Image (cartoon, grey):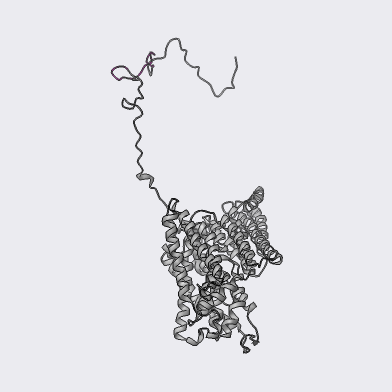
Amino acid sequence: MIDLIAENIAPIMFVTVMAMLLLGYPVAFTLAAGGLLFFVVGVNLAQFAPNEITLFWPLLQANPERVFGVMRNDTLLAIPFFTFMGIILERSRMAEDLLDTVGQLFGPVRGGVAYAVVLVGALLAATTGVVAASVIAMGLISLPIMMRYGYNSRMATGTISAAATLAQVIPPSLVLIVMADQLGRSVGDMYVGAVYPGLILVALYCLYVFFVTIVRPKAAPALPPEARTLGGGVPTLLAAIGAAVVIYVVSYHFVFNIFDDATRLVWSATTATVIVYAFALANRRFELGLLSRLAEQVIIVLIPPLALIFLVLGTIFLGIATPTEGGAMGATGALILALAKRRLTMETLTQALDTTVKLTAFVMFILIGARVFGLTFFGVNGNIWIEELLLNLPGGPTGFLIFVTVLIFILGCFLDFFEIAFILVPLLAPVAEALGIDLIWFGVIIGLNLQASFLTPPFGFALFYLRSVSPTKAWLDAVSGRTLPAVKTTDIYRGTLPFIAIQIFTIALVIAYPPIVTHYQDDRITIDLDEVEIDLPPLGTDGGSLGLPPLGGEDGGAPNFGLPPPDLGGPAQPDQPAAPSLDLSQPPTFD
């Protein structure tokens, strides 16, 4: 019996720790305690299965170094930077300004507020990277507006939940940072690989809204004229955009043409943006009347977050900054924006710092627990057990990806993405690499799965966030003076189902067509060393002899340098006594 337990300690350990996590025990302490407990068990069972268990007491001394390895990881510095940036932007009511302005822009169109929610969700994802902040902000701002103007409650709640979870896959997502760290790949490559899947999701969400407005127009009506407080004025907005494009082209080709391409792009885009933004501010300040109120508001509200997105993601994609440096610039930019809008108070700053420290400590403790767990699990050959189990799945790489998709989708309903990233991803990555799967592609697929699990009833985290800010009973709308119905939990669940279907379709599309993600490799220069030829120039003027006399005689024979030829054979010379033979059976004697 003991032999059987010793030979199967890896699956026993894995199932036990996962069961404790699913029961709700704290993740960091469960991982650390499980690792230490099974380390003691493993050391005592090592004599019964020496080929399976390679644990011994001195190995515990490796844990401090593994913990300090976590502390020295520069990549993880991006987590507090992006978290702080997102919270500052959320506290400065940027989401409120964006939703109001974009909602006014799309107001005359059926489903206009739903389009605004999807697009603002993408913008918030690209600036905050935090799902909870996006769900709560859009739930508090957009849900009352959508309910006030007759949106179907399922349509409203489903759109808000799905749009907010875009923060899982659109850079600078915290999920992608952790995924890149655990897979041992560049965060910049992970960001570039996730751009197209994120844009595809945004397009499919908008396409679904358009489909609903065609099939069920009453489920997503346009804003009534009295709600469009900014009026019309789209032509002047288009003129301002055209002017910005002209300024960019002129700057790129004539003003900054002496610089390299990346620098020209950055400075040309900055010049065009600053000029148009300054013109909109002057139009408002001096009441010039050259721009409509709508165009003026759109430019003033949209340009700062778009500039922040470019500051963070543009510099990373262009190779100007690392993700950690981009996060630091983003945090500084968020502080400047909040200060410029006069919304940076000491209370806001304190709350942002407090939340950032709590999240960072949460991540670090989970990482420390995962390191302790990993030391023991690898010591009982758990990685080999996982590899043998998954490499034998039918279907090869595709079968493995489908299995991982289902597994992550199910576990994501119960476990936080940090737990999945720190426990499962290090175990799955070697198998993926052994099957020839690109790890950036693999990481993006896992990120899409985690986003889908955030939406999946009944345990999706985004659903709980939205439920916490939705009215649970009939409420009086102060604007319209009408009593509006409560939002049922079943409406939230049923509203997300179409978006889950879109999510599954996107995952299947990414699996079936890897270049959607692997395009990040296109700009790399690859060199085939087998085809490299090196031609050395002659080292001298006389056939490569450096002008030195020949080493041999005139006939080119072997050089002798005036010495007698060596004796390579023949009888021994008489003046050289033969070496005495040694009798190894006798002790040595010394004369």
- Can residue 4 be seen by looking at this rendering? no
Q: Visible in this render: residue 267?
A: yes
Whether residue 344 sits left or right of residue 456 in the image: it is right
The answer to whether residue 562 is magenta is yes
**Whole-percent x, y for residue 138 in the image:** 59, 75
Extreme residue toward the top, this view: 575
In the rendered structure, the answer to whether residue 57 lies left or right of residue 183 reads right
Residue 278 percent across, percent down from the top left:
54, 65
> Magenta segment: does it hold 366?
no
**Depth check, front residue: 266 or 284:** 284
Q: Main structural element of the magenta stretch: helix, strand or loop?
A: loop
Q: Quadrant of the N terminus?
A: bottom right
Measured as percent of width and height from the top left, residue 144 is found at 60, 82
The C terminus is located in which quarter? top right
Query: Residue 115: x, y in percent?
Result: 50, 77
Residue at the spot 34% in from the left edge and 33% down from the top edge: 537
Question: Of 416 and 267, which appears nearest the observer?
Answer: 267
Seen from the viewer's position, the closer of residues 591 and 173 is 173
Residue furthest to the left in view is 555
**Above or below — where is 102 with respect to 127?**
below
Using the image as rendered, state which of residue 231 and residue 75 is in the foreground: 231
Which image quarter: residue 459?
A: bottom right
Q: What residue range appears in magenta?
A: 553-566
Point 31% across, 19% down: residue: 557
